[in-house]
Amino acid sequence: MKQVRLGIIGLGAQGGLYAGFLADGKVKNMVIGAICDTDPAKERVSAEKYPNVPFYTDYIEMLESGDVDAVVTCVPHYLHPAIGIQALKRNIHALVEKPAGVYTKQVKELNEFAASKPELTFGIFFNQRTNPLYQKVKEIIDNGEIGQIRRTNWMITTWWRPQGYYDQGAWRATWGGEGGGVLVNQAPHQLDLLQWICGMPKKVYANLKYGYQRNIAVEDDVTAILDYGNGATGVFVTCTHDVMGTDRFEILGDKGKIVVDDSKKVTIKRLHKPESEMSATMTMQDVMKIFMGQGQADIYTEEVLEFGSVWGGQHVAVLENFTANIVDGTPLIAPGSDGIHGVALANAIHLSSWLGQEVDMPLDEDLFYAELAKKMTQEKVKVG
């Protein structure tokens, strides 16, 4: 296969973005095979912008049409696993949007079915994994350059959303429509990056606020404490009511520290000696020099890296990587099976908040779903 025909399921913001990239020839070896949406207005948009592209109102019909080799699922979160499975059943490659699903039980079903079809490409749209900045941070951690991780801190509050954003549709910010708030809508990329770079925690304790600053049923403010099981801890903070927003990610190791500011600048400080060795061998005279701001060069080196980004470049990179895996077997940057980790982390944070207690990882999937089902029943919003 030299050229992959992509079926875009859902011509909303994301689907429209991908269609535009493909129509402009920005993705090597990939073209639009077909477009599917249940909204009649989208059919008119498709006919105007992409007149030669087949349009379907039923995704099953599109999958069985022979018009597509692969699909991307730009639909509500609950539908990602089901559509992914239906595509793979018909030997169609599947690229699932984030999050992979709302709860791990449904994502596990998708992963298990995909594993039975190893000849097909199954990916997830974690475009931040193609960001050279986070690839560099992961490389530094994996190489042991700052040693054993002791603490992680990520404050990501650059998701300001006014009430009007939530009022656009009755399904928004509901348990039945989206399956949650900021954790499942805005922050899945950060939850994935956190576990991709630093690993999964063993325990989670969280304090969430529901409808804190917005008239919604789901969480708009999150503070989660992570326990990695080896003494290391982490804090993850996010919200949708900070109009000024902060994006700061710190990783402290026993041999150094990484600080990421605004997902653009990385400051790496590497100790000449592990902190434990410094503690055991330094005299108080040497310590006083540090306290007085002297002799830092004798203790650590500092490297500052600046990263720019082309708008849409990361999305194009995911599409190209997905295509290359189909065409020539290039390894996936974000295998679809990886999608379950961020969902599990979000589920654990929710469950801890609902129960008011620390939650062990892996979490009790049945208990989580039972609690989620209660939320959906209470609000009486139909699952998308």
Image (cartoon, grey):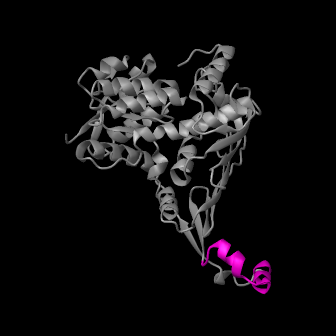
Q: Nearer the viewer, residue 382 or 14?
A: 382
Q: Percent position (x, y) of residue 143?
A: 48, 65
Residue 114 painted magenta: no
Measured along the vertical axis of the image, is residue 214 above or below residue 157?
above
Q: Percent position (x, y) of residue 151?
A: 66, 57
Asked which quadrant contains residue 88, the reply is top left
Residue extending farthest bottom: 285
Measured along the vertical axis of the image, is residue 319 above or below residue 218?
below
The magenta segment is 272-292
Q: Main secondary structure of the magenta part?
A: helix
Indicate the quadrant containing the N terminus: top left, top right, bottom left or bottom right: top left
Instruction: Judge left or right: residue 135 versus residue 21.
Output: right
Q: Percent position (x, y) of residue 80?
A: 45, 28
Q: Nearer the viewer, residue 182 or 56?
A: 182
Residue 285 painted magenta: yes
Q: Nearer the viewer, residue 371 or 184?
A: 371
Measured along the vertical axis of the image, is residue 114 above or below residue 232?
above
Instruction: Judge left or right: residue 243 versus residue 269.
Output: right
Q: Residue at x 65, y 28 (%)?
A: 166
Q: Residue at x 44, y 49 (%)?
A: 314
Is there any visible trace of residue 255 in the rendered image? yes
